[in-house]
Amino acid sequence: MSYDFDIFANNKLPVSAVDFLTYLETIKNKSENTINAYRKDLIIFFRFMLKYRGLTSEEIEFDDIDITSINDEFIKSIRLRDLYAFMSFTEKYRQNSAYARARKVATLKSYFKFLQGKAKIITENPTLELESPKVNKRHPIYLTLNQSLHLLESLDKKNKNYQRDYCILTLFLNCGMRLSELCSIQLTKFKGDTLSIIGKGDKERTVYLNDACLKALDNYLKVRDDSKALPEDKKYLFLSSRNTPINQRTVEIMIKKHITNAGLTDDKYTPHKLRHTAATLMYKYGNVDIRSLQSILGHENISTTQIYTHVDDDSLRDAVKSNPLSKL
């Protein structure tokens, strides 16, 4: 597993946190995105603890607080009330949603479980009684069929990146892949109308490509230029203007630009919303059953996929109208 970040960079983390992230990488085989998320959560928690206990100057900005002073003795002193104070801070001062706060609870539980069970730094785990905030299931935000077609048609064909961007949007809208999955696509992973990608949790799955995807790929490959790319970068399908593998932030900015240019600004559409769009269109128009949709999207739990069973208002309306008592 090769990551683009260094958990040891500048020694910004307490030793126990570095050990924890190393454990996630080498033993638990967690993905880069997961480890980065845990790292960020722990940094925010440690900075809060120093601020909360008055161990840092009031003049120092929160994001500049140095957490390297935190040692095992400090960690042993953390109690459940400190965790409650932290969760209150994330809600009131950082305006974290219930989902974001639930993720922080999961991070802390995993970290302190490691400290007790593996590192043997603590004897009592303060997170055992820490409850996770209730996360209400939200209906996914997605583009309609007409909006999706309009988005693709709105791209400027004279732009030098037209074929690349069109291909990216087509894959998102047809295959429902994740942003990280798209950025990591390699040329050698194509075989006929199938593509092997590495999904969440480093699990490999097969993506089936329809005619629109194959056509967009063919058109992009005709103009794709990797002559200035490094040998190790040539294997990636999508390259940036700097001749390096396209990164997630670049794709996010590109999608936002095209969404804005298409006049679809009523909602905040992101690459993940395009994934929602693909899933919704497959469920609504393709008669795709929920188990097949789970496999296509790479969901570990079917409960995650079930949000798409609630988006077809027209079918619900028709179901009510079909009631034999509706004509009374």
Image: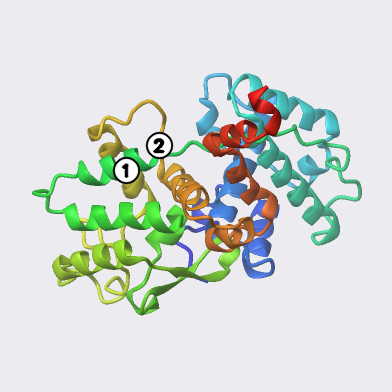
For this rendering, which residue is in front, 270 or 183? 270
Q: Is residue 15 above or below residue 208?
A: above
Q: Is residue 82 above or below residue 149?
A: above
Can residue 53 be seen by looking at this rendering? no
- Residue bearing the label numbered 2: 269
Residue 149 percent coordinates (x, y): 29, 44
Q: CA distance from mark 2 to mark 1?
A: 8 Å
Return the residue found at the far front: 328
- Residue bearing the label numbered 1: 255
Q: Is residue 37 above or below residue 23?
A: above
- Quarter holding the C terminus is top right
Residue 139 percent coordinates (x, y): 58, 35
> In the visual, does 259 lie left or right of 107?
left
Q: Residue at x 61, y 31 (%)?
A: 321
Q: Residue at x 43, y 59 (%)?
A: 175
User: What colouring does the structure picture have?
Assistant: rainbow
For this rendering, which residue is in front, 55 or 127? 127
Residue 92 percent coordinates (x, y): 64, 19
Q: Are marks 2 and 1 in contact (CB under 8 Å)?
A: yes
Q: Is residue 83 above or below residue 215?
A: above
Ranked by sequence position, the earlier of labels 2 and 1 is: 1
How crowded pointer 2 is (Cα within 10 Å; few <14, some 14-19, many 20+) is rated as some
> Quick one: SS at disc 1?
helix
> In the visual, does 290 lie left or right of 215?
right
> Quick one: SS at disc 2?
loop
Can residue 161 be seen by looking at this rendering? yes
Return the residue found at the far left: 158
